[in-house]
Image: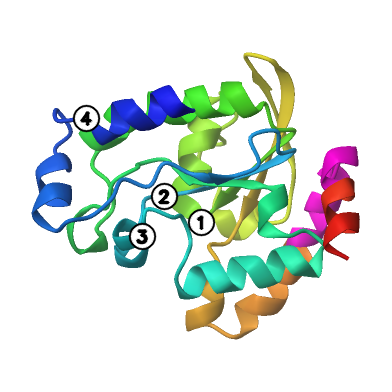
């Protein structure tokens, strides 16, 4: 992980590098347990994340923490990251060139952590991960796939993609909070002995 961080920090060829430097932002590599059973993957950092270098640290992050608590998991028991590691201007969607540049770093993170479940946060992340690992269903929408589990074959073996709405959805639409809480229940099956030990320690 240290090598990945160093490479991203010095990724001068990134079209987002100058924007990062000009605004005194940090790249957001990821945070959490490097042996996590569950890996959460968002789209790209927002302003709060770029200012701190930590993923999901603003209002969406508070919702994520609450959702994790609803299944008995502290943030420390999972790993949280994004596809793109630098903030795009004005929180726009990442461009294909940016995704192509940053995606290999995410794949290396997945190979290092070897999670049982890739929990995608939002439509963009869901579509990217399903396409990347050959499980994309043409025409499928997050409104159809949220709360389901989709098996995928990764370099280290079989894993599961669990599409979830982005935590920000609960901030803009109160009715989505219940949906997110229900959908998070599918992640219980991936809580392993190491995560259970962390939960016991926290208690």
Which of the labelled discs sits on residue 11, or is there none? 4
The answer to which of marks 2 and 3 sits earlier in the sequence is 2
Cα–Cα span, label 1 and label 4: 26 Å
Cα–Cα span, label 2 and label 1: 8 Å
Residue at the farthest bottom position: 174
Q: Which residue matches tag 2?
A: 43
Query: Where does the magenta region start and end?
Result: 184-195
Q: Secondary structure at mark 3?
A: helix
Task: Identify which residue, 198 or 49, lies in the foreground.
Answer: 198
Cα–Cα span, label 2 and label 3: 17 Å
Q: Which residue matches tag 1?
A: 122
Q: Which residue matches tag 3?
A: 52
The answer to which of marks 4 and 2 sits earlier in the sequence is 4
The answer to which of marks 3 and 4 sits earlier in the sequence is 4
- Dot 1: few (<14), some (14–19), or many (≥20) neighbours within 10 Å? many
The answer to which of marks 1 and 4 sits earlier in the sequence is 4
Q: Secondary structure at mark 4?
A: loop
Q: Residue at x 51, y 56 (%)?
A: 122
Q: Residue at x 8, y 54 (%)?
A: 22
Which of the labelled discs sits on residue 66, or is there none? none
């Amino acid at each position: 992980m240290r090598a990945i961080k160093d490479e991203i920090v010095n990724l001068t060829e990134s079209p987002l590098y100058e924007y990062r430097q000009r605004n005194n932002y940090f790249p957001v590599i990821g945070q959490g347990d490097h042996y996590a059973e569950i890996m959460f993957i968002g789209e790209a950092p927002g302003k709060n994340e770029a200012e701190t270098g930590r993923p999901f640290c603003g209002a969406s992050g508070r919702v994520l923490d609450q959702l994790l608590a609803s299944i008995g998991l502290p943030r420390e028991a999972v790993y949280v990251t994004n596809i793109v590691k630098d903030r795009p201007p004005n929180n726009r969607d990442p461009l294909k060139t940016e995704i192509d540049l940053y995606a290999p770093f995410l794949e290396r993170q997945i190979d290092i952590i070897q999670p049982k479940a890739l929990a995608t946060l939002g439509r963009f992340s869901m579509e990217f991960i399903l396409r990347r690992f050959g499980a994309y269903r043409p025409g499928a929408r997050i409104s159809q796939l949220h709360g389901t589990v989709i098996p995928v074959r990764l370099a280290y073996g079989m894993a599961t993609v669990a599409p979830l709405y982005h935590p920000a959805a609960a901030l803009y639409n109160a009715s989505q909070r219940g949906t997110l809480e229900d959908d998070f229940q599918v992640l219980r099956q991936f809580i392993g002995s190491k995560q259970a030990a962390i939960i016991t320690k926290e208690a």
